[in-house]
Image (cartoon, grey):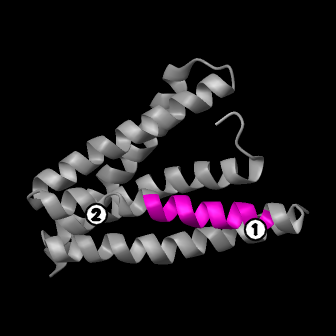
Amino acid sequence: MKNMKRSVKKGFGFGITSGIITTLGLMVGLFSSTNSKIVVLGGILMIAIADAMSDALGIHLSEELSGKNCKEVWESTISTFTFKFVFATIFVIPILIFELQFAIIFSVFFGLLLLGIFSYFIAVQNKKNPLPVIAEHVVIAILVVILTYFIGEFARNLG
């Protein structure tokens, strides 16, 4: 990651973090509200496209506002879309091969593991103690998962 271009690194960091946390939150919320494999699968695919495009445009505008050159703007935009799409769609695999409840649990642990590994590299790069950095990022992801679970339960109970 050290030799990666700043613009690509920005897209990677944003894409992996948002791809994991947003997708896990959506998956858990849809699971707790519907318990439907097809709904969870459809949600993952929809968020992989819509949210990746939205985040890429957000990065694009942010980079333009900060005065980056055209090449850097587009590198950040394309890498954000690509990494967000990849890290969102990776969760399709467990949904397709496992029973839904196990796939959700597996996905949460897998996503937290990926986020922890990425957080470790961030800490090392910034010459910080990895444990607090990992804990901060993983705790935020866990809070998202817990909140979306209860929001899904609330939605299910409305119907």
Residue position for label 2:
92
Residue at figure coordinates x 63%, y 60% from the top left: 79
State the SS at label 1: helix
Check the image and name the residue furthest to the bottom. Answer: 159
Q: Give the camera-side residue of 113 and 70.
A: 70
At 58% from the left and 67% from the top, the residue drawn is 81
Q: Is residue 90 above or below residue 43?
A: above
Say which quarter of the image contains residue 45: bottom left
Between residue 43 and residue 86, name the one nearer to us. 86
Residue range of the region highlighted in magenta in the rendering:
73-86
Crowding at mark 1 (Cα within 10 Å: few <14, some 14-19, many 20+): many
Which residue is the site of mark 1? 74
Taking the image as shown, residue 44 lies to the left or right of residue 74, namely left
Contact flag, marks 1 and 2 (Cβ < 8 Å)? no
Looking at the picture, how far across and down is residue 56, in whole percent?
A: 63, 69
* Residue type marked 1: Trp
92 vs 10, left or right, is left
Residue 82 screen position, x and y as percent: 55, 64
Quick check: 104 above or below 43? above
Q: 72 left or right of 49?
A: right
Question: Can you see residue 150?
Answer: no
Is residue 138 shown above or below 158?
Answer: above
Furthest toward the left, the residue is 99
Reply yes or no: does residue 83 show up in magenta: yes
* Circle 2 Cα neighbour tier, 10 Å, few/some/many (<14 / 14–19 / ≥20): some
Query: Could you tell me which residue is drawn at 20 percent across and 54 percent down?
Result: 104
Give the overall secondary structure of the magenta segment. Answer: helix
* Residue nearer the viewer, 139 or 40: 40
Q: Horizontal and vertical percent for residue 135?
A: 46, 29
Q: Quadrant of the C terminus?
A: bottom left
Q: Is residue 117 something one can see in this rendering? A: yes
The Cα–Cα distance between marks 1 and 2, rounded to whole angstroms, is: 28 Å
